[in-house]
Amino acid sequence: MDKILVQISNILSEAFAECGYDAVYGKTGISNRPDLCQYQCNGAMAAAKKYGKAPFMIGDEVVEKLAGNAAFKSIECVKPGFINIVMSDEFIGNYVRRMAEEDKFGYDATGKGVTVMLDYGGANVAKPLHIGHLRSAVIGESIKRICAYNDYKTIGDVHLGDWGLQMGLIITELKERKPELVYFDENFEGEYPGEAPFTISELEEIYPCASGKSKQNEEFKKAAQQATLELQSGRKGYRALWQHIINVSVEDLKKNYGNLNVSFDLWKGESDAQPYIADMVDKMIEDGIAYESQGAIVVDIAKEGDSKELPPCIVRKSDGAANYETSDLATLIEREKLYAPAQYIYLADKRQELHYTQFFRVAKLAGIVKEDCDLKFIGFGTMNGKDGKPFKTRDGGVLRLEYLIKEIQDAVYNKIMENRSVDEKEAQDTSKIVGLAALKYGDLSNQAAKDYIFDIDRFASFEGDTGPYILYTIVRIKSILKKYEEQGGSTSNCGIGNAKSESQLSLMLELSKFSDVIETAVCELAPHKICKFIYELSNAFNHFYHETKILSEENEDTKKSYIALISLTKDILVTCADLLGIEAPERM
């Protein structure tokens, strides 16, 4: 089903062509002056120079050609040459009726057969999720869902930090605390225990303790570096201990990501890339793109025309160790081998832009991916406190994500209990759903690259551009539909009629934007576009609701038309909320 703007543009394009002008000038957009018209075509302005005519003369010809066309309620050319358009109620009604009948509300998905790999999450094993992990998880999950709605085959990988010195630090600290464990006995020949010698709580305490020691005790640091080397060299006891660390951490991470309604298809980590590194770097040297510089192996990535100087990318450090660039390149080799996606999408803090520029350029120089492979980096801004600085706890530490979630859920719970119409248990359950929506919508409604202020009071408000307001609108519609069914009505035999009021027409016009919004969100990988749409759609519905007697409407056909319209509104709001990773409760 063609988008409404395409349908209108086609009509205008045909008129331009019939008047002797290029059909391309018929492209039409939504008017930025809704008080004057619904849509506007500026093609006459663009055509004026090519055809040597005043734009209003061209516009007048096109408008005259369309005179009497039933698709328009009004169409006029205003100087210097803008074509202002108001579509007929029948045209708008027909479009919205088709939306209600079509799969995906008429949106034509274009991604069938295309695989997209998304790298987001970026959690580290043995460490709890903190607020620094929020944006990657929330934005990445939404983009994955948006891509899937376009029929792409999506593969989401958490890409764990599970290799390197942090593992050696944990092993060394454990050895000091529990030297009797069989993992430290190099002569041990039996089966290693199946159960980990620590809980997640102990593990989360061990790492910061070990990290602190390494900064003050050089001997401890050297022991940790040695343990890291032995782990990576395959020492059996350390590998078994490492596997316990992974298992315990992943189980906890899955629970915490699940609390965010975020999931991953793959739980691979940096360790999975290690088998590819040595051969990869050697091949770069053989191919002449990598060379030695001050003991390290580097690749020049600078190109003519770069706006700023870009340093060479180090692919092997002077001590022979790998780094993040090396690991990401080797991970790409594995991903190409196993999945060969058409597009890669990486989400990380925007301050890592240089890393991804280097990584992407080396990947293409080395032939790890084809030159036309779409490697995309989405850099996000920071979540700041009301002081405008990165959000911290009162004592200046980094807040655990589970505590942040609880804070906003408690704020929502208190608001629900202020207008107590549900029991305490239902209020608690509802606050979990609404609190998560408040948190995620508060993040996603901002353009990803921008920093934003985390304000619990604003995010948890049931009014304004917030998650709770969107959910309250959905719940309000659900309540109306439920009452209609309790009165003996059925939504299955209702059809949408033409608008009978300005507020109804405004609601239908907002609904008609759905396909354009989804297409834009897919092309720009922009969840905030969907947030803006559902906020405006919620406003349009609530305006219609306050001006219209829906259930008490005496004309049965009109009532059925209203019910069909708000049912479509609810379905689109729920669909869009799901694309943001947000669920709606039954009551609020």
Image (cartoon, grey):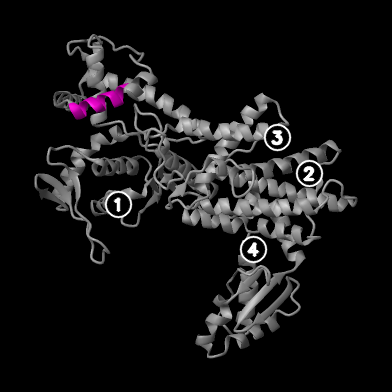
Q: Which mark is residue 4?
A: 4
The boundaries of the magenta stretch are 206-216
What residue appears at the point 67 percent right and 25 percent down from the top-left corner? 424
On screen, residue 330 above or below 238: below
Element assignment for label 1: helix
Residue located farthest toward the bottom when viewing the structure as drawn: 52
Residue bearing the label numbered 1: 360
Does 544 appear in magenta?
no
Eye-nearest disc, 3 or 2 = 3
Q: Earlier in the sequence, mark 3 or mark 2?
A: 3
Question: Overall secondary structure of the magenta stretch?
Answer: helix
Residue bearing the label numbered 2: 492
Q: Which quadrant holds the N terminus?
A: bottom right
On screen, residue 106 above or below 215: below
What residue appears at the point 48 percent right and 41 percent down from the top-left corner? 138
Q: Earlier in the sequence, mark 4 or mark 2?
A: 4
Eye-nearest disc, 3 or 4 = 3
